[in-house]
Image (cartoon, rainbow, N blue to C red):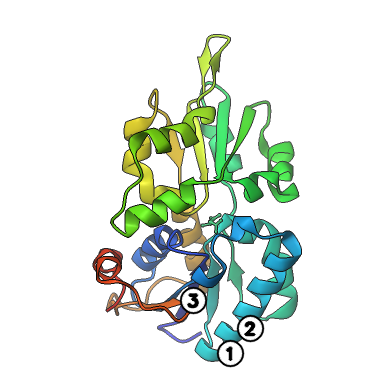
Amino acid sequence: MASAPTILISDSGLGGLTVHREVAAARADAKYIYVADDAFFPYSAHGEAALVERVVALMGTLIETHRPDLVVIACNTASTLVLPHLRAHFTVPFVGTVPAIKPACAASVTKRVSVLGTEATVAREYTRALIRDFANGTEVTLVGSARLAGYAEAEFNGAPAADAEIAAEIAPCFVDGDDRRTDTIVLACTHYPLLLARLEQLAPWPVAFQDPAPAIARRVVDLIGPPGHDRRLPAQFVFSSGNKPSPTLIAALARFGIGP
Ligand code: DGL
């Protein structure tokens, strides 16, 4: 492995930036290419066969072009479905992003946890199996949101959704009864940590929001080792549509160490 590896990070949109931020902090010396598959956003709107076909084809092109040493699929909607197909097609190592159900259930004191993801992620057999295997007596409520990833994209592009719209999406996560309340919410879509401050402000009571990004960064370091030096290069940003980021987006990306 070269001392400064090339790491490709991909999502349907901007949500994977929350993963990029953690991975880049852990391996500051790596060369990063961030790919937002905006031409196929949102992934949750596509059927399973179409999504597998799309992500395998996109990765084929990206791997050919950028020759990464490692690929991070910074998307739960894709990872809970496509990872076995990617590993069957390509030899480069893939790190996926899947709902952090095991640590959330272990950490919950009230033993009431909610999993907030896209409608596709909460419907996946992969997610249901995580609950069967790791809930360990904890009551888990699955909440599929059709709109929150779009609200996160809009917020990043300088057009934030109203409080009431976000509050309505997260309301089913807060379960109260039998003298106990939900105390932990798994952010099972990489877009949602972009809205973390607003989620905390709009929560009807305080909860722990579980973001899987730090665990993904640890997994990347496990696979490719610690940094050789701490020189940081600006990451390259690519829209799959070929679109160029707007000035507002360029300014927001700079806060994530990306661009120009
Ligand atoms: N960022 C993606 C995820 O983690 C979801 C958004 C989409 O539906 O494309 O699930």
Q: Quadrant of residue 4?
A: bottom left
Secondary structure at numbered mark 3: strand
- Label 3 with label 2: CB-CB less than 8 Å: no
Q: Which amino acid, by three-letter code, is at mark 3? A: Leu
* Quadrant the C terminus occupies: bottom left
Secondary structure at numbered mark 2: helix
Q: Farthest bottom residue?
A: 65
Q: Residues within 10 Å of mark 2 (few under 14, many from 20)?
A: some
Residue at 31%, 53% in the rendered image = 159
Residue at 52%, 51% in the rendered image = 189
**Looking at the picture, how far across and down is residue 123, in whole percent?**
70, 45
Q: Which amino acid, by three-letter code, is at mark 1? A: Glu
- Label 2 with label 1: CB-CB less than 8 Å: yes
Q: Is residue 223 visible?
A: no
**Looking at the picture, how far across and down is residue 256, in whole percent?**
30, 65
Which of the two discs, 3 and 1, labels the residue nearer the N terminus? 3
Label disc, if present, on residue 64 of the rendered structure = 1
Label disc, if present, on residue 8 of the rendered structure = 3
Disc 2 marks which residue? Answer: 60
Compare residues 32 and 17 and report the one nearer the observer: 17
Distance from disc 2 to disc 1, alpha carbons, whole Å, reads: 6 Å
**Looking at the picture, how far across and down is residue 58, in whole percent?**
60, 78
Which of the two discs, 3 and 2, labels the residue nearer the N terminus? 3
